[in-house]
Image: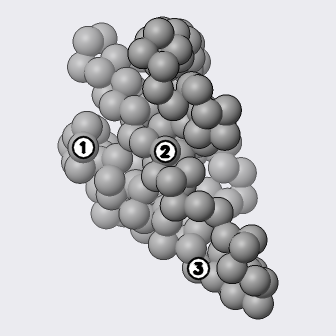
């Protein structure tokens, strides 16, 4: 299986190709904020929320003390099985992480006016970035 850095190099090269394609097709990239949301999602999906969170991987170590939030995830999923399913694996990770983020978000921002909430389009594009990055990880795992 390719190591953490091989995954990163592969993902960022792929992101470059994806960006050029988006530019040629004039989608997402035409809106800088949307493209930024995609890029941040892709970064998070490449460096932090990867399919390898189910083992003592570099990705899990990068979470530092916060890695405890992935412990139940590690217990629930065996490495290389459901976590490495292109669609199901990414969806489970995103739902798992969203529940944690939304709880924190709710606790922090419930007293703020609704204008401070992030538009759901950006959240969706951010999640798409994570799903694409995770899919590329799994594709590289399958190839090597
Ligand atoms: Zn993997």
**Mark 3: which secondary structure?**
helix
Closer to the chain start, of discs 1 and 2, is 1
- Kindly identify which residue carries mark 3: 103
For disc 2, the neighbor class at 10 Å (few under 14, some 14 to 19, many from 20) is many
Which type of secondary structure does the marked residue at label 2 adopt?
A: helix
Q: Earlier in the sequence, mark 2 or mark 3?
A: 3
Residue for point 58% across, 26% down: 30
Write down the residue under mark 1: 87
Q: Residue at x 42, y 56 (%)?
A: 94
Q: CA distance from mark 2 to mark 3?
A: 20 Å
Q: In this image, 52 relative to 104: left or right?
A: left
Q: Does any atom of ligand 1 lie closer than 8 Å to the CB of label 1? A: no
Q: How is the image coloured?
A: one colour
Query: What percent of the width, then of the height, locates residue 16?
Result: 55, 12
Foreground mark, 1 or 2, reads: 2
User: What residue is pinned by disc 2?
Assistant: 125
Residues at marks 1 and 2 touching, judged by CB atoms closer than 8 Å: no
Q: Nearer the viewer, residue 141 or 90?
A: 90
Q: How many marks?
A: 3
Give the spatial CA distance, label 1 vs label 2: 16 Å
Q: Is residue 38 above or below residue 144?
A: below
Q: How crowded is the residue under tag 1: few (<14 C-alpha within 10 Å), some, or many (20+)?
A: some
x, y percent for residue 21 = 44, 12
Q: Quadrant of the C terminus?
A: top left
Question: Measured from the top left, where is residue 41 in percent x and y?
Answer: 56, 41
C-alpha gap between disc 1 and disc 3: 24 Å
User: Is residue 8 visible from the viewing direction of this image?
Assistant: yes
């Amino acid at each position: 299986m390719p190591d953490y850095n091989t995954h990163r190099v592969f993902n960022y090269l792929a992101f470059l190709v994806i960006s050029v394609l988006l530019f040629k097709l004039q989608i997402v990239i035409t809106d800088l904020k949307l493209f930024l949301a995609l890029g941040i999602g892709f970064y998070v999906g490449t460096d932090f929320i990867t399919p390898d969170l189910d083992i003592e991987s570099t990705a899990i170590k990068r979470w530092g003390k916060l890695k405890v939030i992935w412990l139940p995830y590690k217990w629930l999923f065996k490495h290389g099985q459901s976590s490495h399913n292109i669609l199901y694996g990414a969806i489970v990770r995103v739902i798992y992480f969203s529940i944690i983020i939304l709880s924190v978000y709710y606790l922090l921002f419930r007293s703020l006016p609704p204008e401070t909430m992030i538009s759901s389009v950006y959240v969706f594009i951010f999640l798409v970035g994570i799903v694409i990055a995770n899919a590329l990880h799994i594709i590289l795992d399958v190839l090597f």
